[in-house]
Amino acid sequence: MIMNISSIYLKAFYQLAQTKNFTKAASELAITQSAFSHRIMNLEKDLESTLFIREKGNIQLTDIGESLLRYCEKVYRLEEEFVSKVHNSSSSQLAGSIRIGGFSSVLRSVVMPALAPLLRKNPKLSMSMTSVEIDELYELLRTSKVDFVLSNKDPQNKSIKAEFLGYEDNVLVESTKYEFNNCYLDHDSKDVTTSSYFKLKPKLNNDIQKRYLDDVYGLIDGVKLGMGRAVLPSHLIENEKDLKVLFPKTKLRVSLYLLYYDNSYHTELEKAVIEQVTSYFKKRFKA
């Protein structure tokens, strides 16, 4: 006999997975913390699985918990889509939320233009974009903080679809106004962009000074102000008159992927996001 999962227990689980705090989650559901804890324990008992790893001051999802969280996200997305269709049966507009993560050089310059037509056409859509370092992107998707991720890495995970979008070419640039001062600009100390470029031009890697300016637009401004050279995406600096490209034929090529969980069913909104992003990127970043 197939067991049904209590919707009450699922709501409690989902709230705790979002807040990672029993007190806040119970408050959101307007029940006592004791009653809330019993719902979580009963759900784990019914599933015969541990969903959370409880440590002092820290709550983390187990692998089973992460799978259940993605299940909840899908159920709520489908419910949202169904209710929207019922209430707006005469309208073809999409409703719901787009949650997408990526790194700074693609979110503002490419993802926003790619999704802008969809958002203009469907005013009831909400959207949240999250910019993090590349190594943090997979974690955003895995913990269901976003539904889509723009990454330069294919995680080689069977449950994740990795749509190849094209390549982002990075070039070395310096200011046209100021003399080079032997300094190079990076996002932070973990950024490997410059060191990867040096492998293409090893003679450049000679007693250099590093400076860190966080995001890609800070790097562009830093180069303009003569603070140093930087390896930057060519599509971001093609119209910058205050910058010049050194060694135009030497390009650090980075693959781009759209990552999302490969479910058997996607909502109309998810399909629209996938179509808009993949078609725009493939036109913008041709192989």
Image (tube, rainbow, N blue to C red):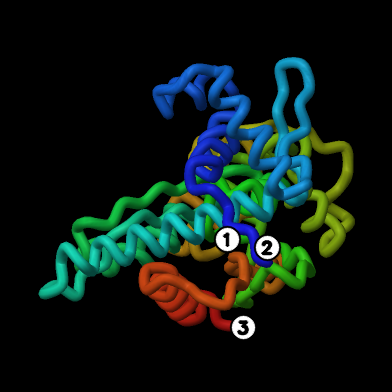
31 horizontally vs 121: left or right: right
For the C terminus, the image quarter is: bottom right
Q: Quadrant of residue 240?
A: bottom left
Residues 61 and 30: in front is: 30
Provide residue 162's location: percent of width, then percent of height: 65, 72
Q: Quadrant of residue 252?
A: bottom right
Camera-nearest residue between 71 and 156: 71
Q: Residue furthest front?
A: 1
Q: Which residue bears the numbered disc 3?
A: 287
Amino acid beneath label 1: Leu
Q: Nearer the viewer, mark 2 or mark 3?
A: 2
Spatial CA distance of label 2 from label 3 is: 14 Å
Labels 1 & 3 near each other (Cβ < 8 A) = no
- Ranked by sequence position, the earlier of labels 2 and 3 is 2
Residue at the spot of label 2:
152
Placement of 282 over or under 220, stated as above or below: below
Residue 189 drawn at (x, y percent): 76, 34
Name the one closer to the observer, 245 or 210.
Answer: 210
Residue positioned 43% across, 78% down in the render: 275
Q: Residues within 10 Å of mark 1 (few under 14, many from 20)?
A: many
Q: Which mark is residue 150?
A: 1
Local packing at callout 3 (Cα closer than 10 Å; few below 14, some 14-19, many 20+) is: few
